[in-house]
Amino acid sequence: MPNTFGHLFRITTFGESHGPAVGVVVDGCPARLKLSAADIQPDLDRRRPGQSHLVTSRQEADCVSILSGVFEGKTLGSPIALMVRNDDSRSEAYEEIRTKFRPSHADFTYQAKYGWRDWRGGGRASARESVGRVAAGSIARKWLREKYRIEALAYVKRVQHIEAEVDPQRVTLAQVEASPMRCPVVAAAKRMERLVQAVKTEGDSVGGVIECVLRGVPPGWGEPVFDKLTADFGKALLSIPAAKGFEVGSGFGGTYLRGSEQNDLFEMSGGRLRTRTNRSGGIQGGISNGEDILLRVAFKPTATIMRKQRTVDIHGKSAVLEPKGRHDPCVLPRAVPIVEAMALLVLMDHALRQRAVSGWMSSARR
Amino acid sequence: MPNTFGHLFRITTFGESHGPAVGVVVDGCPARLKLSAADIQPDLDRRRPGQSHLVTSRQEADCVSILSGVFEGKTLGSPIALMVRNDDSRSEAYEEIRTKFRPSHADFTYQAKYGWRDWRGGGRASARESVGRVAAGSIARKWLREKYRIEALAYVKRVQHIEAEVDPQRVTLAQVEASPMRCPVVAAAKRMERLVQAVKTEGDSVGGVIECVLRGVPPGWGEPVFDKLTADFGKALLSIPAAKGFEVGSGFGGTYLRGSEQNDLFEMSGGRLRTRTNRSGGIQGGISNGEDILLRVAFKPTATIMRKQRTVDIHGKSAVLEPKGRHDPCVLPRAVPIVEAMALLVLMDHALRQRAVSGWMSSARR
Amino acid sequence: MPNTFGHLFRITTFGESHGPAVGVVVDGCPARLKLSAADIQPDLDRRRPGQSHLVTSRQEADCVSILSGVFEGKTLGSPIALMVRNDDSRSEAYEEIRTKFRPSHADFTYQAKYGWRDWRGGGRASARESVGRVAAGSIARKWLREKYRIEALAYVKRVQHIEAEVDPQRVTLAQVEASPMRCPVVAAAKRMERLVQAVKTEGDSVGGVIECVLRGVPPGWGEPVFDKLTADFGKALLSIPAAKGFEVGSGFGGTYLRGSEQNDLFEMSGGRLRTRTNRSGGIQGGISNGEDILLRVAFKPTATIMRKQRTVDIHGKSAVLEPKGRHDPCVLPRAVPIVEAMALLVLMDHALRQRAVSGWMSSARR
Amino acid sequence: MPNTFGHLFRITTFGESHGPAVGVVVDGCPARLKLSAADIQPDLDRRRPGQSHLVTSRQEADCVSILSGVFEGKTLGSPIALMVRNDDSRSEAYEEIRTKFRPSHADFTYQAKYGWRDWRGGGRASARESVGRVAAGSIARKWLREKYRIEALAYVKRVQHIEAEVDPQRVTLAQVEASPMRCPVVAAAKRMERLVQAVKTEGDSVGGVIECVLRGVPPGWGEPVFDKLTADFGKALLSIPAAKGFEVGSGFGGTYLRGSEQNDLFEMSGGRLRTRTNRSGGIQGGISNGEDILLRVAFKPTATIMRKQRTVDIHGKSAVLEPKGRHDPCVLPRAVPIVEAMALLVLMDHALRQRAVSGWMSSARR
């Protein structure tokens, strides 16, 4: 389902970067959740361009309208349609890419797939599509918090070679939001900022790694076999533009350990079964074990750079792409709320799936 | 759909490790593909335990039976049910784990989810479930080869710290199958073998990385937004037991590059549009660009080790797990055909999806 | 998927009767179909209230806006979001039903399901939801006409006891649209009109049967087993508000025949295989056989009547419902375009599914 | 999903009439339901051919094997694979239809769809496919009975012109099973038997109507819009071979009533909200209202008749089909357990869906 995500909590996003609007239809939200635009707007504001000098200067208010599914301040159980109008659409800045394929963008592959494309600002391939994801994620966030006290928190863990030492168990939203980089470690954040500024000046770009911690997930969520949490978080986070890698817990690093080092031993603690270490990242056999879930996503450096690049046009002729327009030298700060949103959507879907068949220990914890 | 994978080419696997049988129902295979058990058995033999001294000594012939969907040697278009009987089920070897949760296994999480579990050999969480995946993958392999000359080849790229330098464009199946490690570089394979032997002697285990190359995929396959190839390959490969990480193309490594280094410039070559480099790993904007698709999966070291481990039992009491039974000190060689199978299943599904709406350049190439 | 219909051509509708808007997201439409609001508006106008004295006098222009998926007059292959603002929402007319359950409406069942409901005009249960269906159906109609010259035509076959003798092979849209009843037989249409007027005067309502013919469907569409055309058309048409019955071809009437009378004998005619009769209604074994597809839907009389009715309120107390507001004494004329839309959505979905795996005789015909 | 039915409780059937086996994989059954072959076999025995002189004399024991998903007599929560071997496959009896299309069978449409077909006994289009449905239905029956005391009971309501007056609220399984016709009214059953015998002697066939009552369904099950109970029961029952029509409650008959006659008035009775009449058939706005759910299906007369019929062969030449082999002159008695099974599968799926989001009044009743 190309534009739909989830089974019981399903979102369908729509909209092109420079079309009339972007948005999402959220289906499967339980009835009687208190909800208003004020629950959604803050996350959209975190995703919005123009927040700081580090990100694209495109200026859009991104005000969300609730078109359906909410009545007298509460959800009805019917689909919640959310819409954000596209305001600031300077299409002329994109005239050149009408015919030239931008390297490492989706221009060529969309042309190959559909036979043509909306070339204005990347069209459907624009990160602007994520407005719908973030808006839907806010609903999942509210429900998971109210029903299970679950919290999702993402942050920039590394920009190119600059890595922050973060304790995922203790890090707070305030620490993350303290810097425009959304890196919760002050010193590292400062260094990252300087790097991004330098890279911007050079007309280049950088990537890095976002880490996301999910706290309070009860044991027993997720499905064995294909819909393992590992697989579903992976799909969710790898569907974000520019994502090229994903790992859970010790991830790629764990492949350097031996079994005797990687294994998380069980113990009783505080009256419930815990693991002493958390190299599993809160997921065992695809199912949550009650520990913090720990995810990481690799984002490549932004494909748009302010440098001349050789390419080919839609007629198969060599061409040179001139630097023009606005761009994000580093997408990571704005990707943070998108990572949280996608992780929350997966969790909410599995929460509902687990409620359908409900179990033993997990139900005891509720 | 916990036990079903795919949209137009869908597989549903069934079976526990020590139940009567494991198998798969494959729905959506086009009619009139020549098919017999001889097309499937070779891949199952590659997955089978007991192939070498490096893997578990469980002895099972794993002979596949075709129960439906094939008539006079050709597919009917109806579901193809494939079954493999479980022969060698020494349940008594597992008596201890009836009550004790094995560290970093799915014992505890299944108990939390379902309130009980089939403790014999991991039950549904056993890698034996992958018999159905591999059998289904053989069908996808045959169809993709016949219709599109597409080839999938996976191999062991790294075991713990031992990494092989492999050229994904040139590596052959013969090179991969030349060593019981399924590492195509002879010297590296030998070193890996020695490491696995040493680790086995110590009752420990190791993990590593499998790389998979897909050759011949036309441009235009995959979907934007949620069903990006990146996301669907990620989900598929992260659903394999013990997988903890996934990357495409330059993956995590690409986050250390700048945009000007990461970008793949376009050029015309041999009459078609190509990229000079392939850091995108054959996927741009979630859609194939005609270059080789390059995937990597991180497998943690086997959780079962032949050492005493402290744990907790189902009554919440401390316990010690004694080493017992058979185990794979390194799952990677047997995981190679599973990785290929899952990648092929994703490709075949997207092939059918693309045929439904078909495009412009991609159709020209067919 | 409560609010989503279809597999490859999927629609998700949203909106309550008196909320800000109703609409639909259409996913899976192939790229490069010429499309503008002018292709959609005529069908919406046929569904619109206030067309004649026979239907509700609620006045809404129902102007459709295309929010996404169309660029320079052609579809992009991305989701097409369509929205219609709700203008004329006299909620006060519904104040009484805030607390009283209307007989044979969805008031009580929604309350039972969700714990509360949008009582204004039926909320999500209002026939206003069908705006999205009809708008989506117009897209399917255009694509099926352009690719396959397929035509869908529905009409009022019977109102209470007044039945029209219609030849489904010859009836035309002009004949259907000639009367406000959408019954193509002039004399019958007149009698129906008089009946509806009389019933309206008495504050009562009537139901009847809509017949739908689909012409030009090639043989080989539809799936065996669960997704038979019979089953998918049935689901589609039975999901329309007030539908209580469905039949294909000879339907319930065919149960009075013997096999020797019901069977459609094959013959060659005009170079292709035909059936002499069409009691199968164009579907055999769930799959189209190339003959006209013939469907019928039973609509119960409108539940809203302008008479006092005894009922119960949300506190479980006896109550009397006073006649108030506007209502359709007979929903059939306005249901005609909804029936067509739903039938077209099913066909388009199966067209794409068949293209994915394509066959032999059907492909020969294309 | 051609061979899969359901969302949370999903069945996938497989098998051709004369292949090695038929069966089903049931996914989504909650864990810890007591289950053995003895729970399933009785329903299969009711569906089995050769039960009486009224149905086909094909003799098959139809013994079910549980291949997975059950351990120590209880469900695991993993897929339950059920298989029945095909024993009595006299393919030679079908040699003639290898090349000749049987009128009103699926021979031609399968050929058109797939380019070829398994001609032996109808292959996948055979009613033998329903073995898997009935087996899966037994699991749903057991779970619904244990959790909600829900009961499904179907019976033959009419054969051609012979109709039985049945009180759906009071009819019992014993009454249904008392006659080989599965008609609970003795006198009508006798007349039906005589008709079927006479028709058989003449080499002809008859159809009729099966009615199904579902008792004990709490209010609030089902979904608005597309997944209305009306629509889902319709799809389920119209997917049964030979089904040509479906209705709920007053159905087609209700179209002859006025709104003031059709409407079911609410009242309080026994401490809960009831309707005085049940023309809605237990479903309002697509959602259960707590009254008995009442469904009817029209089955056409069996297409196989023991008479010469003119037809066309696969080469497009005129041909005559000679009467040969075994056949059911009336499928209705054997279709009764299939109707029950499909209705139960729909209910169980909606039960789980409702548990996922759970409501207010319905939860109060549990």
Image (cartoon, coloured by chain):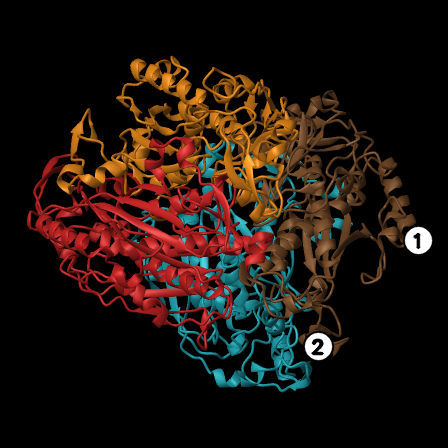
Chain colours: A cyan, B brown, C red, D orange
Instruction: Tell me what residue is drawn at x 23 percent, y 43 percent.
Output: C300
| Residue with the mark numbered 1 | B187
* In the rendered image, the vertical position of residue D59 relative to residue D4, given as above or below: above
Q: Are marks 1 and 2 on the same chain?
A: yes
Q: Amino acid at mark 1?
A: Ala
The chain under label 2 reads B
Image quadrant where residue A25 sits: bottom left
Q: Pointer 2: residues within 10 angstroms few (<14), some, or many (20+)?
A: many
Residue C168 marker: none
| Residue C350, x across and y down, in percent | 49, 52
| Residue B217, x across and y down, in percent | 70, 61
| Residue A75, x across and y down, in percent | 32, 51
Instruction: Tell me what residue is drawn at x 72 percent, y 52 percent.
Output: B297
Contact (Cβ within 8 Å) of mark 1 with mark 2: no
- C324 to the left or right of C217: left
Give the alpha-carbon distance from disc 1 to disc 2, as whole Å: 34 Å
Screen quadrant of the C terminus of chain A: top left
Does residue A72 appear in this view? no
- Residue nearer the viewer, D3 or A294: D3
Residue B265 marker: 2
SS at mark 2 in the image: loop
Q: Amino acid at mark 2?
A: Leu
Q: Pointer 1: residues within 10 angstroms few (<14), some, or many (20+)?
A: few
Q: How many marks?
A: 2
SS at mark 1 in the image: helix
- C364 to the left or right of C334: right
| Residue A101, x across and y down, in percent | 63, 78
Image quadrant where residue D274 sits: top left
Which sits earlier in the primary sequence, circle 1 or circle 2? Answer: 1
- A13 to the left or right of B293: left
- A3 to the left or right of A185: left
Does residue B222 appear in this view? yes
